[in-house]
Image: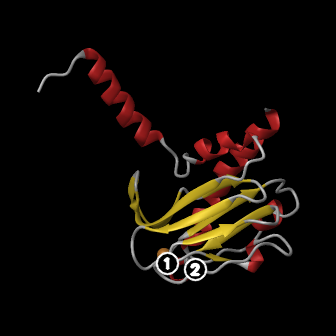
Amino acid sequence: MKFTRRDTIALIGGAAGAAALPAGLSMAASHASDSDDTPNVHEVQMLNKHPENARERQVFYPDIIRAKVGDTIKFISVDRGHNSEFEADWSPEGGTEWEGAIGEDIEVVIEVEGAYGYKCTPHASAGMVGLILVGDVSGNYEDLKGERFRGKAKKRFEDIFERADALLAEEESA
Ligand SMILES: [Cu+2]
């Protein structure tokens, strides 16, 4: 098999790009379409393995969603055995609540702005958690970051918050 120089560059670019992709980068795509008032649908896959890092097991992908009030989050049961459930302690006061059954696809319309940490009920302490940032998150984002998370959720959230901080800082400077 012969590669042209262009093919090679494309391959290298693709591989390097994939390796450098932080979890949840696809949020950039959903975020880009958020500039108007039309409600958007954001898809989150429930997976046994992270698509770009097989060492990361039990994941929501992407694990950060940037949304606005009225947007729909669609949790897709790609691999069996997972669900998505809101967590009152990780949500804004009076925030939208949801609880999917194990193995069920669910659609959630977020009606209250703020930062929402959420979990897969059986795998929360295994680190299967995610973050949805809806509208202005200044009301509870810092509180959420100060929560005490259990097991592997602690490390996952640290990583998630690092990327979310960068995303919010970027928005502020835009
Ligand atoms: Cu799970």
Instruction: Please tell me in which quadrant of the rendered image residue 16 appears.
Output: top left
Residue 156, percent from left and from top: 57, 63
The kind of residue tagged 2 is Gly
In the image, what residue occupies the spot 63% across and 81% down? 99
Circle 1: is it few (<14), some (14-19), or many (20+) Cα within 10 Å? some
Indicate the position of residue 95 as horizontal and vertical percent values. 80, 72
- The mark found on residue 140 in the picture is none
Instruction: Please name the residue that numbered disc 2 is placed on.
Output: 100
Which residue is drawn at the image coordinates 62% and 56% (left, top)?
Answer: 41
Q: Is residue 109 left or right of residue 25?
A: right
Q: Position of residue 111 (x, y in %)?
A: 79, 66
User: Contact (CB < 8 A) between labels 1 and 2?
Assistant: yes
Judged from this view, the residue extending furthest toward the front is 38
Q: Residues within 10 Å of mark 2 (few under 14, many from 20)?
A: some
Q: Amino acid at mark 1?
A: Glu
Image quarter hosting the C terminus: top right
Task: Give the number of the disc on residue 104.
Answer: 1
- Left or right of 131 on screen, residue 26: left
Which residue occupies 56% across, 82% down?
A: 121
**Circle 1: element type:** loop
Q: In terms of image quadrants, where is residue 54?
A: bottom left
Q: Residue at x 11, y 27 (%)?
A: 1
Provide the secondary structure element on which disc 2 rests.
loop
Q: Is residue 137 visible?
A: yes
Q: Relative to 57, does residue 11 appear above or below in the rendering?
A: above
Report if residue 157 is visible in the image: no
**Foreground of the two, 61 or 30:** 30
Disc 1 residue: CB within 8 Å of ligand 1? no
Residue 91: percent from the left, percent from the top? 77, 71
Image-based side of 111 in relation to 14, left or right: right
